[in-house]
Amino acid sequence: MKYFLNIILIASVLIFSACSTEDEGHSHGEDGDHTHEPVAKQPSGEGLNNKNDSGNTSEVLVGAGVITQWTDETELFMEYPELVVGQEATFAVHLTRLSDFKAISESEVQFVFSSERGLEGSLTETEVQIPGIYGPDVVFDRAGRYDLTIIIQGMVNDTLQVKGIPVYAAAEDVPAIQEEEDPNLISFLKEQQWKIPFGTKMVERQSLTRTVTAHGEIEARNNGQALITAPFSGIILPAYNSNLPAVGTQLSKGESILILNPAIQSADGENYAQQFINAQAELELARKNLERQKRLFEREAIPEVELEKARIEYRRVLIQFQTINEIVQVDTSSIETYGESEQSYRFELTSPISGTLLESYVTPGKQVNAGDPLFLMADMSKVWLKVNLPASERKSVAAVGSASFSIQGDDQIFKTDELSGRFISKSSSIDPKTRTISMIYEITNPDGSFQTGLFADVHVSTKESLNTIGIPVSSLIEEEGSFFVFVHIAGESFEKRRVITGIKDGNMIEVKSGLNEGEHIVTVNPYQVKLASLSSEAPSHGHAH
């Protein structure tokens, strides 16, 4: 890709030109590589990586530059050699999207240079050989300090500014004092970072509340369960039950779940069908008698007390019939002789609630007795998180607040507050076997992922809280009882640092010493940086792309 930009201003001229095919240092194109030579670090005390008011980094540079800068959306890592008037220089600009820490590609990146004289020139790159690495080639014709504005449009829409880039009139004007590179720094290249799950985070102070780690389990709510039992002695005939619901099936209230045919003889000597017929007959007789008594009372043929007796009798047999038929429906759609014999009845059990079928104790062809369990159902839109709190922490969580938890096999952290959670109960006694106190939270289960029986690691909030430096637990690497983090010194340079930790708040932990506000640390996949630190073949800071 060729760039040639020659802008003549009143005060200065800035020429951008493409690398020639004979240039061994840098080339763009399908067959070109992208190599930048090792660059010396800035002398200390020159303002490298100073913070501006917006929290981003502003640099005042001397000699070659290695720049690392963050905005809310983008990380900039830029390298360039000593800049001398009339000599072509390559800027190696690495751009990372912070939402997923992937290389920025398929974007338009504009580079605008300016000075105290005003705009000096600009160029735009839309195609690069390696995603995330942009390499404008620049020739300056005037010494001085230049500001670079980088405008990104595409994967992110963002603007970054690097101030005070020095350009020298001659090579001998470049400061000779250079700081040696720290041999303890770990090199982990952008190309390596972009290929794996990776992430960094700025160290900040925040409010942390100490939590107690406890074992938990997901359970169905007591008031959200329904045990469906056999209302009478009967037989589950296969001919009528070819589509029995399986465990895990979602059922609606009133939905048919089983046809139960009455047994020839029940345990108490009376067939349930006969009980149903008798209750239905009594109800019909009571209804007709009440209607007759109403007509007689209207003619003043009977006193009011006789009408009231008829009403009371009707209510009694109605309640009796409703009780015996509460969860059983009679299918009469194809029965012409309905009510004339016991054989004319088929009894259909329906779901008493809307929910999930948790257990089935039904076997087609089996005879069951009255009261035998058939199905266990639960409304799983809300579940209970049962926590077994260590007895030693019973006083610290006297005023029970929120809790966070993770489910076995899932690293995601859930918070009871974010799941419309509420505290249900706390046991007043200690389990003698486990030496724990039982606590229960009720939480919503919108997608049904919280299944009964799943174990959970729970972090229960205590009364102890403070404002302190806090970092994600995922940032820590433990070695021989000590904890370490990897501090992001520059785009591809990391430092292993020991930290002293304090209270833990869910997936966050206090750092008492070892870190300063404003530093960046690796929060995702720090183990890969550790492996890079152990590699004897780790590339040096100057590397080829």
Image: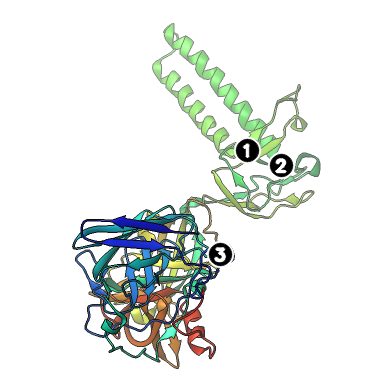
Label 3 belongs to which residue?
Answer: 453
Nearest the viewer among 32 and 500 is: 32
Q: Earlier in the sequence, mark 1 or mark 2?
A: 2
Secondary structure beneath label 3: loop
Q: CA distance from mark 1 to mark 3?
A: 31 Å
Label 2 belongs to which residue?
Answer: 260
Q: Is residue 106 above or below residue 524?
A: above
Q: Earlier in the sequence, mark 2 or mark 3?
A: 2
Please state the horizontal and vertical placement of residue 341, each as a whole percent of the image.
75, 28
Secondary structure beneath label 1: strand
Q: Which mark is residue 48?
A: none
Frontmost of labels 2 and 3 is: 3
Splitting the image into 4 quarters, where does residue 162 fall?
A: bottom left
Please state the horizontal and vertical placement of residue 237, each as a whole percent of the image.
78, 43
Q: CA distance from mark 2 to mark 3?
A: 30 Å
- Asked whether the viewer can see residue 47, the reply is yes
Secondary structure beneath label 2: strand
Q: Is residue 320 left or right of residue 335?
A: left
Q: Is residue 284 above or below residue 464?
A: above
Amino acid type of the residue that numbered disc 1 sits on in the rendered structure: Val
Amino acid type of the residue that numbered disc 2 sits on in the rendered structure: Leu
Q: Is residue 278 left or right of residue 206?
A: right
Q: CA distance from mark 1 to mark 2?
A: 9 Å
Q: Is residue 188 left or right of residue 51?
A: right
Label 1 belongs to which residue?
Answer: 328
Please state the horizontal and vertical placement of residue 502, each as a whole percent of the image.
31, 82
10 Å crowding of disc 2: few (<14), some (14-19), many (20+): many
Splitting the image into 4 quarters, where does residue 474 fall?
A: bottom left
